Amino acid sequence: MSSTAAGSLTVTMNGSNHTATLPLLPGTIGPAVADIRKLYADLGVFTYDPGYGGTAACDSKITYIDGDLGILLHRGYPIEQLAEKSTFLEVAYLLLNGELPTDAEADEFHRGVMLHTMVHEQLRQFYNGFRRDAHPMAVICGVVGALSAFYHDSLDINNADHRRISAFRLIAKVPTIAAWAYKYSLGQPFMYPRNDLGYAENFLYMMNAVPAEPYHVNPVLARAMDRILILHADHEQNASTSTVRLAGSTGANPFACIAAGIASLWGPAHGGANEAVLKMLAEIGDSSHIPDFIAKVKDKNSNVRLMGFGHRVYKNYDPRAKIMQATCHEVLTELGIKDDPLLDLAVELEKIALHDDYFISKKLYPNVDFYSGIILQAMGIPTSMFTVLFAVARTVGWISQWKEMMEDPSQRIGRPRQVYTGHVQRNYVPVESR
Ligand code: CMC
């Protein structure tokens, strides 16, 4: 934790002369944060921040977001440059280790990951316990959690080698587990990973190939998939990453922590939004229905949201959404899809929303999920796999954040407080008197 204060904030209790001085901790960029750790000891009060919108729970060197300017940096590198010039495995190395790899380091990392792509053969049995129509997020949540029952040799969280091997195992095995969840839903044989293929290429191969025929992965689609994985790799302290950190803060093993992250990602306010966008577009059906839909979104009593819009941190266009939109056009061109009614509908919806006072005043812009589903659908990936794909990519971010936390000597168990609004102490009432 940064210890040099960049000034301080003085808090005075109303109606008394009790004050607390809160040091202001500077980041390398971004606003300073007030260190409230001694506030309770000094003044006897906690802070209240449901949803943690104004609270920094850790310090981190991995990812920086400027939500007002729409900037996303990984280890200082802008997402636009990484999406254009890098590869997913290189970004994974960067997130985990802090620097871009040399050629030799990249080769070694690639080999290290690909060495672990197979899963223990007994894990295959787990799939048979699920219904065929189970949501693949339910399946991967269970199977990833079960990894801790198979890889006892890398569970010592205080051993740097164990942490490194667990990271390799997770990055390598989650695509295999995810592709098998899809194959299971289709009733097709599981395809074993091919280590001669690139990371994204291998994932597409395991999802789409069948043993009866040769399968060639389209390089343009493999590149698009690689870029989609880069765009989802990390996003600082979002809900699922915070879940992973909270679980990890108790000393839980990394496989259990990532399973917790997957569960947290599933919700439609988070990673489940890409699936929800496609459902929403299907429900709208035609651009003539957009005004009615927008009216419902604006109606406070309707509970309908424009999925793929809005973000806790971005109050500007999500930079990932811009890249996603460009990738969408590339993929559709490669696939020879001249007119995609869903894309047309999404573009029209975005145009209308961006000119509507409701969205302007609340600073609601498209986020990463607005266009990703359209690309994935065009690539032949079923809607139920969209969030799974997000989980495959985010595993790298989760494990990097977990590793950073484990290496931080000031790390302690995450344990928020509360404002208690229940009954004050009272005596037990026997049933006959209630
Ligand atoms: N459609 C309509 N109104 C919205 C939307 C939306 N998508 N998002 C926020 N608002 C309104 C909300 O009703 C509230 O209005 P008011 O101040 O009048 O009560 C205001 O904007 C602020 O919303 P909030 O819910 O307090 O904001 P939040 O920071 O808690 O929520 C969010 C952020 C992403 C959960 C929310 O914008 C949302 O539900 N978006 C749709 C789901 C979505 O696309 N999620 C993906 C997020 S990006 C990828 C990821 O994180 O996984």
Image (tube, grey):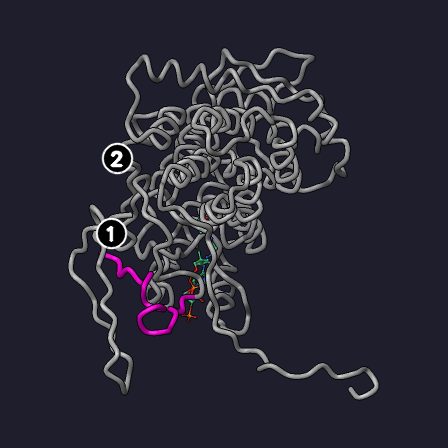
* In the image: residue 294, left or right of residue 152: left
Element at label 2: strand
Q: Identify residue for label 2.
A: 77
Closer to us: 118 or 10? 10
Ligand 1 is found in the corner quadrant, namely: bottom left
Question: Could you give the CA–CA distance between mark 1 and mark 2, rounded to whole angstroms?
Answer: 15 Å
Using the rendered view, name the quadrant where residue 329 is placed: top left
Residue 414 spot, x, y in % from top left: 46, 53
The boundaries of the magenta stretch are 30-49
> Disc 2 marks which amino acid?
Tyr
Residue 211 spot, x, y in % from top left: 68, 14
Looking at marks 1 and 2 on the same chain, the residue that comes earlier in the sequence is marked by 1
Element at label 1: loop
Q: Identify residue for label 1.
A: 69
- Residue at 34% x, 29% y is 97
Say whether marks 1 and 2 touch (CB < 8 Å).
Answer: no
Above or below, comparing residue 419 to residue 405 in the picture? below
Closer to us: 73 or 215? 73
Residue 328 at least partly seen: no
Residue 419 spot, x, y in % from top left: 48, 73
Within-10-Å neighbours for mark 1: few <14, some 14–19, many 20+: few
* In the image: residue 170, left or right of residue 63: right
Within-10-Å neighbours for mark 2: few <14, some 14–19, many 20+: some
- Is label 1 or label 2 in front? 2
> Disc 1 marks which amino acid?
Leu
Using the rendered view, name the quadrant where residue 52 is placed: bottom left
